Image (spheres, rainbow, N blue to C red):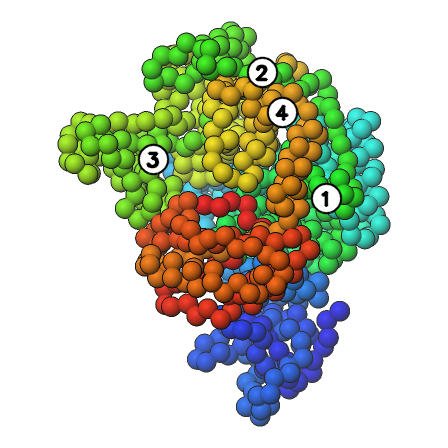
Amino acid sequence: MNDFFPGGARIAVLTTQPLPGPLDYLAPEGGLSTGAVVEVPLGPRRVAGVVWGRGEGDFPASKLRPVSRVLEAAPLTEGMRDFLIRSADYTLTPPYQMLRMALRAPGLGDEPAMRRVYRLGHHEPSRMTPPRQQVLAVMEEFAEAAFTLGELSEAAGVSTSVIKGLVKAGALREEEAPRDTPYPALDAARPGLDLTEDQAEAAARLREGVASGTYGTTLLRGVTGSGKTEVYLEAVAECLARGRQALVLLPEIALTGAFLARVEERFGAKAAEWHSGITMTERRRLWKMVGEGGAELVVGARSALFLPFRELGLIVVDEEHDTSYKQEEGVLYNARDMAVLRASLSGGRVILASATPSLESWVNAEQGKYERLDLTSRFGPAVMPKMRAIDMRAEPMSHGTWISPSLAAAVEARMEKGEQSLLFLNRRGYAPVTLCRACGEQVACRNCDARMVEHRFLKRLMCHQCGETIPVPTVCPSCEVEGKLAALGPGVERLAEEVTARFPEARLAVLSSDLFGSARALKAAIEEIAAGAADIVIGTQLVAKGHNFPLLTLVGVIDSDLGLQGSDLRAAEKTFQLIRQVAGRAGRAEAPGEALLQTFQPEHPVIRAILSGEEERFWAAEAAERKAAGAPPFGRMAGLILSSPDLQATFDIGNLLARNTEKLRAIGAEVYGPAPAPIARVRGRHRVRLLVKAAKSAPLQQALAEWVAPVKLPANFRLAIDIDPQSFW
């Protein structure tokens, strides 16, 4: 419930500025309520903020400044404000940073107004040029969207004169429109696809949960291609029918055209989208409509969790195991875990959907904290692919090749039948290492402790940490000897070179994020492949994220052992999930599929578990190992990352923290480090890590806050605390 404050009342306003907490102001004439989005004076500036409650400071009321103005936006609900504070407490993030995430929309302070927008017209232009084709391609992709002149010009990469010429030709129409309008209503009563018996049973259970109007989390585990989407869309329909809003989180929102088309088919209108690929105008519109109830269903990336929903009744986290739900820069949070927190505060339901759930979710279901529903067979005539290992120790391999004779024969057989093959290698670029055969030096980034990766298609070497690129050198940067640089190891571009030589008649497609200038281009390539435009597809982990290629019947994993190297706590789990997900791309239509895993360790427990399909046994064994080690999800961990341009000073602060651990020892926690991070220098900053390990029940956040509080960081130093780290780079 939001309290109302009359004009002149003392109120507390939390701003988006780096301040320890809310500041006191005076309510403007006409009053306002708790949660109101406002603009307040702060020194000579005006900044955005939210009314957090009654002012309780001791600053004289006569000296308080009034709120400058109340913005045209629905107030943040009590549940939303509670979520921001609770998530800030959990992640040890200052509340102002959480509020910044919640107010991340352009033009919130703009007055309601009309704007000139452009939509698709009804006539073909008499003269077609490549720039005109680019504009029309953008408009057709976003058929219902309205673009301002600047947005359309930028999206299509053309001048504004091209757009104006299309208006004159009748291919586009120009009109005045309100800045922010509700999204088209969704028809929750519209029938979905016919469900199988186990799908219908799972859908009924999910509908019952949503209808209860109470919090609960369900793990929806279904094998790849089992129709999990159809099942959870039934829960979305129930949520909408009850007048509440729903949010579906996806790990790769800009690439999920098929999913959005399915949503439109199910509900008769497009869902609202929230991700980096939408225009600033749409971002502002969606933010406002979510708060006013003018957007019933949002499909979004992880940051959509911080939109100010008025009445959020359901959150679906699709592919909940995906590591992209963990934000690794800025505010460090896991959207999967924060979704559960948000739903618990709004009285909503959470559905965690995956074919290969995270160990955390599996354990929560085993312990009865989450309900679990299983879909054990594929939808329709499709069956699960057969899986077998190719023992690379027994394969006669030529130097500089990575496709075994056994895998090559399988690809050849698919081509003869007009079917597609996918070759999976989780390495971008041409080669991960460029070595000088004269001096032995590996070409490294000048800003990071990382090797430069050759991207031959781009004719550049690239650092995958900071993005630095340089032309491929002809002489060694170290010894300056010419003609001795050699590319070592395979990336997807090098694999493409081998495929072209081995299968010259094949139509080849390479799917890697750095080979496409935009998400739109990548999405178009995926749609073309699904329509049969390629015989052989080479891809990175991008291809594992839910794509459906009906003609694809063979998946070949080039290096199944790659993810098992190193000391990552979750190496076995991540490898199991990734390979099972990639294998699941095969045989999703009527033709049966097969997955072949090239490995030098066919006897490795993870490889054996992948091949056998005995997932429950794998999760149980993995859980037992973690429990014995007191590791998550049976224990708690937090990572501390110190960084600065001065290595010794960074270690000095790390050692200071390591010597003063009384607060942590008091809760039974252990501290490891300081030690150089695995990638010890990024963008010119030296990185030092400490790791804190504690029991599951330990009050870790409070102890961490008290531990680091006395440390005064010098200028240009940063300290990041990562609760429940997913990676340790």
Locate the C terminus by quadrant: top left
Q: Nearer the viewer, residue 683 or 616?
A: 616
Q: CA distance from mark 2 to mark 1?
A: 31 Å
Question: How far separated are the C-alphas under marks 1 and 3?
Answer: 40 Å
Give the x, y percent position of residue 700: 61, 59
Q: Earlier in the sequence, mark 3 or mark 2?
A: 2
Residue named by callout 1? 364
Secondary element under disc 1, as helix, strand or loop, is helix
Viewer-nearest of labels 4 and 2? 4
Residue 459 occupies quadrant: top left
Please state if 169 lies on the left or on the right of 581 as rendered: left
Task: Identify the element where label 3 is drawn.
Answer: strand
Q: Residue at x 15, y 30 (%)?
A: 482
Label 4 to label 2: alpha-carbon separation: 11 Å
Between the C-alphas of marks 1 and 4, the distance is 21 Å
Choose the circle earlier in sequence order: 1 or 3. Answer: 1
State left or right for residue 169 relative to residue 715: right
Rate crowding at label 1 as few (under 14), some (14 to 19) or many (20 or more) other CA atoms within 10 Å. Answer: some
Quadrant in which the N terminus is drawn = bottom right
For disc 2, the marked residue is 388
Between circles 1 and 3, the one closer to the viewer is 1
Residue that carries the numbered disc 4 in the rendered image: 609
Marking on residue 453:
3
Q: Amino acid at mark 1?
A: Asn
Give the residue type that dot 3 points to.
Val
The percent position of residue 525, horizontal first and vertical second, equals: 48, 29
Residue 182 in view in this figure: no
